[in-house]
Image (cartoon, grey):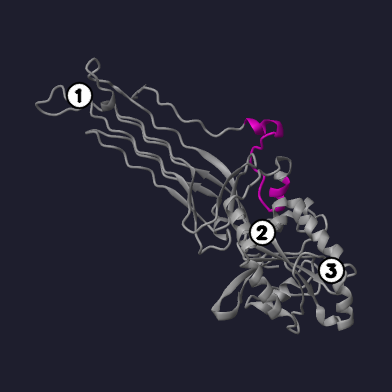
């Protein structure tokens, strides 16, 4: 089977640049026997910077670039010349990327906008040259400061798709068929569970030249929030959608119960998903007659818009688009979307499951793991304190 180009999980090693050493040079020139100290400062080391880029849709470009190194700062030199700053290293990521510490599982940052920049690792500050230490009582200091050391960290980059509508349903609920019927996307469609193994996006045309984006998420099964089936690997993509479209086939024995199972899995994975707007689509309705549809109406869940559709015959698709557009633009959904984007709370990864998660994603384990009881003792690197050090 061909390797997929949809990469939404990657672990990389990052290292910032170290600061250049300050110079302890003494000025020597004709007719100036006591020129004094003129050693320049060292240059700053390069930063490692994350930058959002709307031209990227996956993390594929980072899959084979696992080591990101920023440039080191150059040393200071005579005539008070400051060393050149180290070159910053930019990591371009798609919007919707969340970053975690790969050793502790702790949340670091979230990139949601095009052009947004976050300094992941700061470069070391350059050391001061000896001319900075000249005083009336110490007119010829023969020492300078060393540069600040570099920082290093292994991080997990995790992509969560940004879409207006996310499709939620069990395998073979007709999600991929609906995406192909509403948009120009062509996801794989077949009559067996887990046909869809990776999320896909489709742009749905609406009235007056307007459009919205729907995300086809691989099927969820009962227990997905505990890692069963495709489990946690794709549940995270639902978090970014402003509206959830639940899809249950019309020939299901108990539509309400299946809907409640799906809702429970989302709530178990992230309780905040229960606050999102919801629409229920009963699929494969071309198999139902009018009398059966009328009977099902009495057993369906209450409190949310419901529409009977058939992606094959086109039944109810325009009505579905009208309902989705109305719900997306409702004041309550806009407020919920604002709260999700502006006040979203990212939780640290479960440390006890972090190694298993990385193994499931195909990441190597060739790194020193921190014991669970020591995870709380891991702190960020403290600010470096300069000390005077004679130049060798």
Q: Position of residue 80 (x, y in %)?
A: 24, 33
Give the farthest residue toward the top: 137
Crowding at dot 1, Cα within 10 Å, few <14 / some 14-19 / many 20+, comes out as some
Left or right of 33 on screen, residue 328: right
Label disc, if present, on residue 300 of the rendered structure: 3
Label disc, if present, on residue 36 of the rendered structure: 1
How far is the residue under mark 1 from the one under mark 3? 88 Å
Sooner in the amino-acid sequence: mark 2 or mark 1: 1
Q: Which residue is pictured at 65% across the width and 32% down the height?
A: 376
Left or right of 293 on screen, residue 166: left
**Magenta-tinted stretch:** 356-377
What residue is pinned by disc 2?
237
Contact, CB < 8 Å: mark 2 with mark 1?
A: no
Sooner in the amino-acid sequence: mark 2 or mark 3: 2
Q: Is residue 383 visible?
A: yes
Q: Position of residue 170 (x, y in %)?
A: 80, 65
Mark 1 secondary-structure assignment: loop
Mark 2 secondary-structure assignment: helix
């Amino acid at each position: 089977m061909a390797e997929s180009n949809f990469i939404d999980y990657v672990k990389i090693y990052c290292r910032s640049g170290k600061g250049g050493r300050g110079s302890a040079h003494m000025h020597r020139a004709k007719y100036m026997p006591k020129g004094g100290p003129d050693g320049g400062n060292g240059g700053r080391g390069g930063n490692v910077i994350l930058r959002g880029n709307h031209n990227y849709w996956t993390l594929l470009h980072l899959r084979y670039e696992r080591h990101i190194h920023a440039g080191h700062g150059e040393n200071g030199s005579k005539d008070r010349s400051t060393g050149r700053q180290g070159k910053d290293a930019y990591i371009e990521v798609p919007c919707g990327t969340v970053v975690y510490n790969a050793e502790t599982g702790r949340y670091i940052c979230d990139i949601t906008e095009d052009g947004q920049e976050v300094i992941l690792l700061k470069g070391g500050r350059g050391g001061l040259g000896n001319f900075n230490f000249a005083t009336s009582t110490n007119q010829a200091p023969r020492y300078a400061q060393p540069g600040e050391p570099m920082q290093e960290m292994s991080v997990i980059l995790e992509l969560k798709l940004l879409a207006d509508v996310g499709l939620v349903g069990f395998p073979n609920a007709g999600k991929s068929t609906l995406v192909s019927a509403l948009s120009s996307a062509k996801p794989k469609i077949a009559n067996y569970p887990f046909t869809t193994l990776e999320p896909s996006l489709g742009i749905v045309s609406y009235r007056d030249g307007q459009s919205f984006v729907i995300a086809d998420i691989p099927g969820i099964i009962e227990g997905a929030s505990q890692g069963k089936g495709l489990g946690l690997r794709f549940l995270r993509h639902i978090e970014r959608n402003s509206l959830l479209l639940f899809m249950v086939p019309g020939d299901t024995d108990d539509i309400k119960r299946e809907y409640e199972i799906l809702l429970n899995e989302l709530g178990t994975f992230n309780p905040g998903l229960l606050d999102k707007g919801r629409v229920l689509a009963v699929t494969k309705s071309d198999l139902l007659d009018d009398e059966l549809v009328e009977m099902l109406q009495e057993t369906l869940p209450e409190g949310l818009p419901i529409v009977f559709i058939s992606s094959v015959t086109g039944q109810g698709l325009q009505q579905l688009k009208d309902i989705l557009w109305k719900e997306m633009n409702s004041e309550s959904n806009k407020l919920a979307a604002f709260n999700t984007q502006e006040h979203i709370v990212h939780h640290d990864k479960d440390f006890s499951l972090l190694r298993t998660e990385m193994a499931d994603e195909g990441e190597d384990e060739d790194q020193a793991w921190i014991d669970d009881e020591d995870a709380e003792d891991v702190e960020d690197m403290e600010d470096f304190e300069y000390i005077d050090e004679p130049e060798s």
